[in-house]
Image (cartoon, coloured by chain):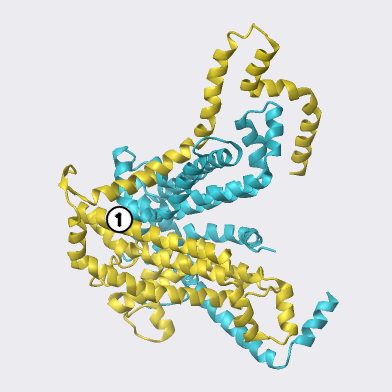
Amino acid sequence: MQEKENKMKNITYVNLTLAFELSYILFQNKELNISYALTGSTKTITVPHVTRARRILHTAKPYLFIAPAVLLASVFCWIPAAKGFIESFITVNQAGSIVGFAGFSNYRILFSDKAFLNSLKVTAVFVLLFVPLNTFLTLFAASLTRRKSRLSFVPEYLFFSPVAVSLSAYSLLFREIFRGKASVINRILGISAPWLTDPAGAMITLAVLGVFLDFGIDYILLMCAFRSLDKDVLDAARVDGAGGRRLFFDIELPMVRETVLVTVFLALKDALLISAPIIILTEGGPFRSTETIMFYYYVEAFRSGNRAVQNALSSLVLTIAATAMTVFHLSRRRKKS
Amino acid sequence: MKNRKKRKRVIRRPVDTFKYIIRKVLLLLMAVIVTFPLFYMIVSSFFTPKEFSRLSIWPSSFVWANYAKALGHRHFGSYVLNSIGTSALAAVIRTAVIVSAAFAFTHLRFKGKTVILTALILTLFVPQEAILYQNYRTVASLGLIDTWAGIISTSLFSAAQMLLLMGSFHAIGKEPYDAARIDGATDIRYIWNILVPLSAPAVITVMIQTLITVFNSYLWPLLVTNRPASRTIQVGITMLGFAESGDIGAQMAALVIVTVPFLIVLAFTKKRIQTALIRR
């Protein structure tokens, strides 16, 4: 790194004076023309031609650099979002061709579907179960390891390790550990809960799985937030007699509020959009008890091929997500200023 | 050092010993809960079918039969190959796309810059899950079902990572760029020889993040692959068929094979991630 920097500096210094004029002429064609014109050189008849090509290239260059990004963002984000939004107001037949303008009838169909209304309820229950549980447990683990010590890297690693486990691995593991009355978890806890074979049990299992999926990243964010706190402030509080609990609740916790807010928001987003773990863990069951909005969307779009419902739901989720994120960002910005 | 020790002793009161023990017990309990699924995954990969039905938590013998079965699965090799291939390809392409865009936004002046940048950043407000079906249709109409291109297509751009790189490029400033231009270096050469080496930490972060995200993605690869041989490991691992035939041990062995490399990588990168996150 250092060597490269030095090398770069050297190149700059050596060549700066010598190359300045030449490169300036090479790069700034516009000025070149003007200087030729000023000096009255008449042998520049062919130059404007080259210059024009170069100038076009020069103007086009920034766009060439951003073209791949813009293309990808359009093809896989803006166009599908816009298409879904437009198509949600259109009636499409089985073959996929447009039949007519539908107004809000697609949304009406969606909201009259009992399965959709059920999925709204299921998602609400999941959010209420998962978000507080996740926030509490990650904050708890982070607060337990907020002081650095000689051996703290061991619990740190253990609490961080869930990030190394993929979604499908955790889902498959939970399917086995919580498989029903005769399950490992029951043996260890000494109870006989029905877990995945029962609607309420399946929901609890799903919430616990959700915590494991988010635990690692939330933990490391919170733990690092605690460690980033100003040592002088903490020492001052200690000198003033704030110890243990008071120090934590009155000083440290309010100081990491921002990070807690971020993890809560991430948890909220994950909870509202959860679908993949359900596909592996419960398939929406038993008795549609874990069929969340996005799982319903997945089933309608890819298994039933229900276009009307799928586009309406997609637009609905997009609108809600965009609104929620705008609100979140605005509230954060306001707090900062 | 001596001073600090002394101060600690002064501050710690006798009550604290009790609190200290409670804290350690809670810590241990929490650690046990968090690591239990991983622990169970590893021990049960040595179980016989009988031990699963007996709900054991420790294997009677450490035999590698389950691992042999998992590795001997007809498609296991292609699952792993597909996962490594797609994640590496996605990491390289995404980094190239983002570096070039971030360079243009930080170093060049052009019309419509703010508008385009805002439009790109606003993609953060569109959750991929909500446009799953439309994206699937695009990929299907491009004939990319069952291809690596189809699997990586939706993860080749990330506005969040572009912002990260822009921050890093901005910190370098424009002086090296002006100097390089005066020396006659083209933009591409400047990016490759100066900009990327100077912001190596950010660029590597983007690459690793992409690698892990694509490697671990489940829903999208599930949708765009139909043939068993073109599935990624995250999708394939749920379709090995071991659990269905009562061979859960082989299923667990497959999970261990997929997870342990990441646990090892994590042990080496944990400190780096931590220092990056702790602001002092």
Closer to the camera in the image, B66 or A64: A64
Q: Residue at x 72, y 83 (%)?
A: A238
Q: Which residue is mark 1?
A: A314
**Which image quadrant: the N terminus of chain B?**
bottom right
Which shade of the palette goes to chain A? yellow
Q: Which residue of the protein is positioned furthest toward the top in this rendering?
A: A43
Kind of residue at disc 1: Ser
**Mark 1, chain letter?**
A
Q: Residue at x 67, y 75 (%)?
A: A147
Where in the figure is residue B207, as x and y percent of width and height? 55, 48
For mark 1, give the secondary structure.
helix
Where in the figure is residue B73, as x and y percent of width and height? 38, 53
Q: Chain drawn cyan, letter?
A: B
Question: Is residue B17 visible to us here?
Answer: yes
**Which image quadrant: the C terminus of chain B?**
bottom right
Closer to the camera in the image, A157 or A141: A141
Where in the figure is residue B189, as x and y percent of width and height? 63, 31
Where in the figure is residue B175, as x and y percent of width and height? 71, 38
